Each structure stands twice: as structure tokens, then as C-alpha cells.
Amino acid sequence: MKKPRISFALSLTINRLIRAVIPVLCAVQLIPGAASGQETTRMEKEHFTPGLPGMQDIAGLPFIHKEGTETRQFSSHDPSGGNNDGNFTKSYTKYIDSNGEYVIFDASGPGCLYRQQYNIWWIGRFKDPGKTHIKYYFDDESSPRIDVPINDFFGGKISPFTAPFSFLDSSFRFGNLYYPLPFRKRLKITTTYDLNRLSKDGSFYPASWYQYTYLTYAKDTDVQSWSKTSAKAPDEVIRQWENTGADPKSEDGNINLTKTVKIRAGEHATMAEIKGEGAIAGIHLYLHPYNRDLFYHTHLRIYWDNAKTAAVDLPLSSFFGSGGETYKNCEDIHTRTLKTLLYGYNGQAHTFYSYWPMPYWESARIELWNDSQTNIDSLQLNIAYKPAGARRYPRESAGYFYAKRTIAQDTGKGTFATVFRENGSGHVVGLSFYSNNYAMDGDEFTYIDGSHTAQIHGDGTEDDHNQGWGGDAYQKPLWGGLINGYQGAYRLYLNDAYIFNHDIKINYEYSYVGGHDYGGQVDAVVYYYKSALPGDLVLTDALDIGDPKSEAAHDYKISGKTWEDTKLSGYDGYERNYEYDRVRDDGYGYNGSGEFVARISPDNKGIRIRRRIYRSGNGIQRANVYVDGVKVTERPWDICTLSSAPYYQGWYDTDFEIPASYTRGKHAVRIRIEYLKGDGSGADINAFYYWIYSYSGDMPAAGNPVIKNLRVASGKDYGVRLSWETDQPGLPGRYFRIFRSSNPDFSDPEPVGSSNTYNFTDKRVLPETRYYYRIAAGPEPEQDRSQTVSIKTAALPLHATAQFLQTDTSTRENWFWKYGSEGFLAFNFSFERNARALPDYISGVEYGNFENHPGSFVSVGGLETKDTGSITLYVNDSRQHSLGVYLYDFDKKGRSQQIEISDLKGNPVAPRQVVDDFKTSRWLLYRFSGSIRIRLTNRQDQGTAVISALTFDQPNP
């Protein structure tokens, strides 16, 4: 049988064939004409070009971005940690500007908006929202340069925002736009009208989702704001996108190498070994025979510059865009065809292609391993590569290409799947994502350079992959899927690459929602470039606001102080752990200025300042920044996050880049941060902690500190007191995470909090119970844990009081913004999971004789009992607190039940309350102190007694 040749080789011109024949005849090993041993002059560092020029220069992908370039994203994620993404008031709208318009994006430049994913259409039934206008204000202008109906904008009716850059789903489920919008000074995006009021029947309108991904650049990046007069149709990009499957890069200067081999099961073959400096430009592969076994178990390995570890070590299926070998929804996926801009395969023709540019400086070696049970009769590999003379990538300017696969499964206790983590300097450029029994409402959380706030926080897995409402098997140049937007999807991050200078971690949340509460499986491949040089972002100093020693050491001064407080809060939480990454910290609010002296590296290429703020009630904070008395004119420190974030998710890390022109050659600088009044901003700004980083590749980063002398004792106000030391006592920016287990072997540990100091008190403990603790330090706190210490907690005081105050029949299920200012327990809030954010004075909760009643999008959940059930609240202080007991008759049976509150001995401490025939809902409000037990008793022969939530607040005077 005549074996087909791959299209790449057939398309060669006569001239290219002549260049290709010689290496084939000479054998697999090839030495390009440019000698690798010759000295090369050090060139000016090249970087990836922003805007349309970079968009069409696919060959420029390996170039590392300039220091000071950051990837950021605005989205409509739920700031409470739940799944109420897209809530128009609390999640969609960042603030309402002076024009009365709803702001969804507000960023200072220079920067460029590359990706717009939008979904305000209600599963195709309501198209009215798309008739509202979307407006783009550039550089603080009073009039928008773009002011069009949303349907027209994403529907390709407004030039130059037309296909293939724009896309609007035919069922009006979602829209995308990939036309870049550069901005020199500032870009603000608003929409008109309250989307809650646009549904035809006047009911609540829940669909208001979006993700806007953008880059901000360093001072010397040439960025000119988009304008109608300068707008043009990028013909070269259109050509590339309309010809997926063909190499989007120029083939000029390519040298082609072809080899055909047989590989028996269990054996491997070296397909190419290229000496010298160059770059792989394209890979084509033909496989015979072709079956599922070979598809998933033939491994591609690529090595750069004589490395012992492969940069790519993946099955053909994974590298070329497939996955999910064991997933039922992927049973026939090897027979399908995938065509993206840079990789794909044809299950009918048995061919694969890749066009990632892959530079190397000494050598490249490609191997294929047959780990299947099937012999390969013919494997034909065609490689196109460019020697250094055709396209040079200076080693100091570009990164190696890598692809890394992660397989994760939720065992029922997981909070998220970590699909990627890496250290060093580079950028993520692509993702293939497959899942099984996975709830699509899980958000993406991408943490960059040690930030505790996810710079990329999505609002649903299929939305993160540019689809909505699950999506379909679209195949677009930069996004799509073989199944849909979450079970088998891909996304290429060409201009909106995730840039990291120290480390990066990508998590996908395990959601309650979608019918898959346990057992979710994820199979993901991340494509990225990483510099051979170490990451150049080094922590050189830190300032702990509220710590007198730290303030004195940094000559900290403040003017216009408006408040001083200690906060116990968390960063963005997950559906299964609202209280993820909790920290107690001291800080100040001010409407004047705060200033301090910070140590930096004198050979720096700029510095980055990170600041922890408390955003609850004040998410819009603006400031001017001064270095040694000189104002940083590139941009103000603009913070635009959600003021609606609740108290238990108040922490937010925000970064500010200062160019080297202000800092070069200095060992220390005085930083002044001055309050700036602006549209939508609060009456002050605040600060709790500062980290100061220097871009300095010549300054080695400190390793993770080793925890020493971990000690444990009973705390003063109950609880467990931990203290420790490290081998680096002077290390700036210390950050420790505390883990706890109930098992001597430390199995099933849970994070219980974080600390910026060398001590921590765990108050979330049950009385007379033994616990085991470990401490972790460093950017990956799951690793490098300390030794284990253990302690048995003390008994709690038995004295308790309670007073019934009143019944509330009007608040009903919309309680979140009225009750629970200190904490809450929402039982079976989403399917069969409790939502909780407990106050610090609640040490633990125990339940007795209840069954679950799962809630959902449209119904309230709860606990129910046929006779009597109990909830015990262990309280570690003696102060008075307010308690709300929420009763919801979810099946409208007209229940009758009684509520009793007693101390832990069973003695009643409040009058018994009887609630009859509450066919909607009731709130019972109490004041209490000490540990109490709440008993619910069913007063009917049939049916059940129910409870849906407990809330905690400060008592009224």
C-alpha cells in the first residue's frame, strides 16, 4: 500500500526540496550552516511586540516580555466565594461613574486589551440586553471613542471588529472579541442600563458575565491608544486565522528534515538530533497503523541543549490537543479532527501538526517512544527548523518551549485542581483541558509571582475557555473544543499570555454546581515558554504595617489617618472553602499619604511594590506614587476591585511597577503613596503590608526558610497557640501557612490559616480534642513543612446565656446583605454542601440527627429532622453576640416545629419558640453568650423540622 505523504512536505518548493534533501541523505544528525561554536555579539534584548504587530508575528512568541509587563483580568466572579457570578450589582458592576454608567473595566496604561469574553444573554431567550450600549473611554476623555450596541459589537457589524476577531454564538449564549485595543494612559469600559431590569417579564436577570484580559507595559513600550482613524483590518492576521492547519509563520529560511521508521511496542527511536543554534518551526507526523492504543501511548519527547530532562514528554494525544483517555466522553476522540492555529490532528488521515516556534542554542533532539501494545509499521516525521541565520533568538531574550501535563481528581475533599505550576521567568501561551464528572461552574484561579490574590480569576470553566452555558464543539483559531467548553476544550494565549517573573500556579475550582459534587477529573496540558535564566524578580524588603519594629526600621510615616484596625479576613475564596488563605493583620486607612524607606538591589531593572489592602466597602482606591520625592508619571496606582466583597474575603494584593529610571543604581528608595480622589473612589485608601521586589537577575533569591523549634501551647482565650523560628530570621516578607490534622500520621491535613509573624493562634478547635500541626513556608506552602507537634485542647466553660429578641418575616432568603456581618452557616446551600464563614469566636460546630436537603440555583437548602435534631456551637469567649436562626419551608408543607436553646449541660437558657405554618420563611433573632446547643423538634406526626442557616452579628446596643 502506498503510504500518504504529509502535506507539509508536498508543499515544498523546488528550492526548499534541494535544501531538505541533503540532511536526509546525511542521516538523522544535522549540523546547520551557522556554526554553533562561533562567538556571537551581545544584541539588544528583544521582546514580544504588543498590539497588532505582535499578533501577526507568531514567530515572536518565544520572546520574554519586558520587566514590568503584567497580565491582568477583569471578570464578574462572585466576590463572596460562592457561585453567584454575574450578579449585576455585586459582581458585574465595579462602580457607577459620574455619568450613571456601569463600569466593568478601568485600568491605567500603557496597556492593551486583547481578549473580551462576554455573556449577558439568557440562553438565547432574552436578546434585549444586547441592545444596550457598550462604551470605551480612552485616556480620560469625556466622550467614548466606541459607543455601540453590544449585539452589533460582538456580532461583527462594527468595523474593524468583524470576523474572524468577533464571534457571537448563534443561540446568543456568549460572544468574544480578539481585536486588540491599546491604550496609552487609561481605558474605561461601561455599559448602559441596569441589566437586572431588561428581562421581558421584569423578573430577576442573572446573566451578566464577562472576562476582559489585558496586559500593562513598562514605561518605554511604544503604545498609542486606539482611534477610529488609525484602526485598520489586520490582513495578515486574517489570513493566518482563515487557514488553520497551515503554518501561520513565514516559511522563508526553513530547512526540512524527514525520517520514516518502524517502532516495535516497548521500543523508541531518535527521530532528529540537530546541532547548533536555531528553532523548530513546524512538526508534522503520520502514524500507521492508527488506533486508540497508539494515539494515547506513543510518547513524544523533545530535549533542548543537551538537557537530561525532556522539555516535552507527552503522548501524541496530549501534545497535539486531545486528552481524557479514561473518560467516557472521550471514547472516540482519536477518530475526530482538531484544527487550531498552532496544533491539531486528523483522526481520519492519521496525521498531526504543531507550529509552535521552539528555539534552542546548542542542540535539539526529538524522540518517539512506543509505550503501547501495538507495533508501529510506519511513523513519518517531518521537521521544519530555522537556523540562526534565518531567525535569531538571543538567549537572553527568549525562552525554551515546554509542555506540561497534569492529571487531577477530586477525592471529595478537594478545593481545586492545580493544573499547572512553574518557577522562573516566562509566559503561558496555551491550554488543552479535558474533564469528566467535573462541574463546569468551577472558576480559574491563576496566581502569579507569589501574589495571594489571583491575577486571573474567572467565572466558570467554559467561560475561561471563551464559551458559555457549557458551550459546544466550536473550533476557532484561538479557542474551541472537541466536545464543549469544559469537557474537551482549548485556548491559545497569544497576546494575552500569562506572564510570570518568579512563579505561577493555575487552579481550577471544584464547584458544587452542575451535578458533580465529588469525583471530578481533570486532564490538562499547558504550553509555555521559560527563560533559561533564573527568574529575575527578587524580594528585597517588606514592611509590616502596625508592627512598631517594622515601621521604625523603614522610617514609616503617615498623614491623614482615618482609622486603625486589626482585620481577620481571607483572600478570594473557593466554593468549598470560603475562608481559604485567612490572615489576621493590622493596618491603617488614610486620605493623606503614607511613606517608607525600602531596600532594593542597586543593579535593578525596575522594582515592583505589592500592597495588601482591605477592599470590603472600598474596592476603588487610587493614589499617586513618589520615589525620592519624584512623582511616577507613567500611571497612578489604580485599584479597581469589588467593594461588595464580604468581610471574610476582604484581602486583596495589588501590584505597582516602578521603572528603572527612578531606581537604578540605588540601594534604597523612599516611597510615598498619596491618596488621589477619583470617580468612584472611596474617602480613603488603606494598607496592611508591603512587599518590595527588585528586577535583578544578578541577585540570588533566598530559598524557602526552614521551620525550627515549632512549639505548641494552650492559648489565653482558649484555642491553640503556635510559635516557631526559622533558619533565616531576617528574611523579608515572611509568610507562613498553618496546617492541622486529627490523625497522628498527619493524613488529610487542612489549612487553618496564615501568618506574617512567627506565631499563630488556632481558635477553630473542639474542646478536649487532640490535634496535630505543621507549618509551611515559601511560595508553595504545601511543600517543605515542619515537624509535627500535637496538643489536646482544654474543656470550654459551661456557662451560657441567651435572650430571644424578635421574629423577622420580611427578609426571607435575601439575607446575605442584612445578616451575617460576623459570620454564617448556610446548610446545604448549594446541593449537599454547607457554605460557611465562621467568626473567630466560634471554635467548632457539631450536628446531631439531621438529614440533608440539598439546595440549588432556585431553591434554598437546609437540614431536616423527623423528630429532634441539634446544632452545638462551641464559643471561645464570654462576650455577647447576635444569632439569627433561619427557617425555610422549602416544600411548602406548612410545618410546625419548636426551637430550644440550652447550655452544654442541657439547661434551657432562652424561652422555647414555636413556629407554625411558615409557608415562606422565618427568622428568629437572639442575643447569646457562651457555648450553646440549638434543638429543633418536629411537632407533627409526619413531615420534618427544618433549618436553613445560622448567622452571627454584633449585638445592637
Image (spheres, rainbow, N blue to C red):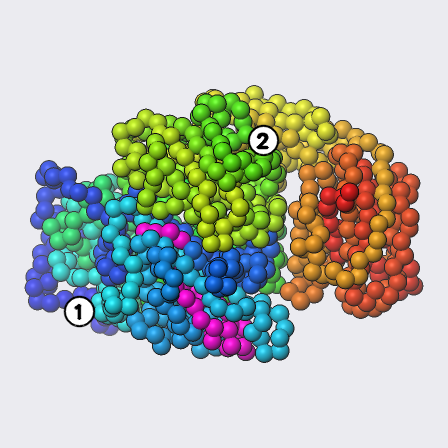
Q: In the image, what residue type sits under mark 1?
A: Leu
Residue of label 2: 774
Residue located 81% across and 39% down the image: 929
Where is residue 241 drawn, in percent x and y?
A: 28, 68
State the CA–CA distance, disc 1 to disc 2. 62 Å
Q: Is residue 269 left or right of residue 205?
A: left
Residue 645 seen in render: yes
Question: For this rendering, which residue is in front, 232 or 453?
Answer: 232
Q: Is residue 521 left or right of residue 830?
A: left
Where is residue 43 drawn, in percent x and y?
A: 15, 42
Q: Which residues are magenta?
A: 107-136
Helix, strand or loop for disc 2? strand
Numbered-mark total: 2
Q: Is residue 39 magenta?
A: no
**Circle number at residue 841:** none
Residue of label 1: 10
Image quadrant in which the N terminus is located: bottom left
Residue located 27% across and 32% down the image: 664
Residue 695 seen in render: no
